[in-house]
């Protein structure tokens, strides 16, 4: 069967950046299962999977707009070190939950200079073109419950 709305598709993937460096891969792990049409994965990849069947292998380049979004300079802020009360050691790359006008958001420390800490609320992959190599291993109909919940249940899916 072909991947379409209300299908659960399972696939192996390797994600590389523009330089060919591997960002993420399912190699050596369980493949990823997702509910098609539910926004479980980035839009550009979901679109490229539409109509594929088990055994299909392909590569797709996903632009930032169809991936994790473009970078917004407004999500980069400089805050005083005192904003991190209770944290003993601050290091570049540390992740925190911060409160913003749009509610809680995840930020990463991008730089530290004296008392000034630069935090970046962009997704780590924002602004990047994503290069996926994909191999589809299973396609099945979603159960009514999965379609209702908007995610996959069972092996490699939600447990609840
Ligand atoms: Zn569920």
Image (tube, rainbow, N blue to C red):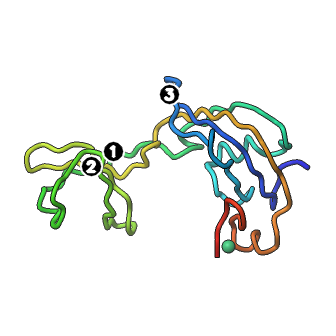
Identify the element where label 1 is drawn. helix
- Farthest right residue? 1
Q: CB of residue at label 1: within 8 Å of ligand 1?
A: no
Q: Quadrant of residue 95?
A: bottom left
Tag 2 near tag 3, CB within 8 Å? no
Residue at point 22%, 48% (across, down) = 91
Query: Distance of mark 2 from mark 3, alpha carbons?
Result: 23 Å
Residue 109: mark in rendering: 2
Question: How many other residues sit within 10 Å of disc 2, few (<14), some (14-19) or many (≥20)?
Answer: many
Query: Distance of mark 2 from mark 1, alpha carbons?
Result: 14 Å
Tally the marks.
Answer: 3
Q: Quadrant of residue 105?
A: bottom left
Image quarter for ligand 1: bottom right
Identify the element where label 2 is drawn. strand
Question: How many other residues sit within 10 Å of disc 1, few (<14), some (14-19) or many (≥20)?
Answer: few
Q: Which of pointers 2 and 3 lies earlier in the amino acid sequence? A: 3
Q: Which residue is mark 1?
A: 73
Q: Quadrant of the C terminus?
A: bottom right
Is residue 10 visible in the rendered structure shown here?
yes
Query: Distance of mark 1 from mark 3, alpha carbons?
Result: 25 Å
């Amino acid at each position: 069967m072909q991947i379409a709305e209300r299908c659960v598709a399972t696939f192996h993937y390797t994600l590389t950046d523009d330089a060919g460096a591997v960002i993420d891969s399912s190699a050596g792990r369980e493949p990823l299962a997702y509910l098609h049409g539910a926004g479980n994965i980035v839009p550009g990849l979901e679109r490229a999977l539409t109509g594929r069947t088990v055994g299909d292998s392909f590569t797709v380049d996903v632009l930032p707009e169809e991936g994790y979004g473009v970078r917004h300079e407004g999500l980069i802020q400089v805050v005083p070190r005192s904003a991190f009360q209770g944290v003993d050691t601050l290091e570049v790359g540390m992740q925190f939950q911060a409160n913003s006008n749009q509610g809680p958001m995840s930020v990463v420390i991008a730089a530290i200079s004296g008392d000034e800490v630069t935090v970046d609320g962009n997704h780590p992959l924002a602004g990047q073109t994503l290069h996926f190599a994909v191999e589809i291993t299973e396609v099945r109909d979603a159960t009514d419950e999965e379609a209702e919940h908007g995610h996959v249940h069972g092996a490699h899916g939600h447990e609840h």
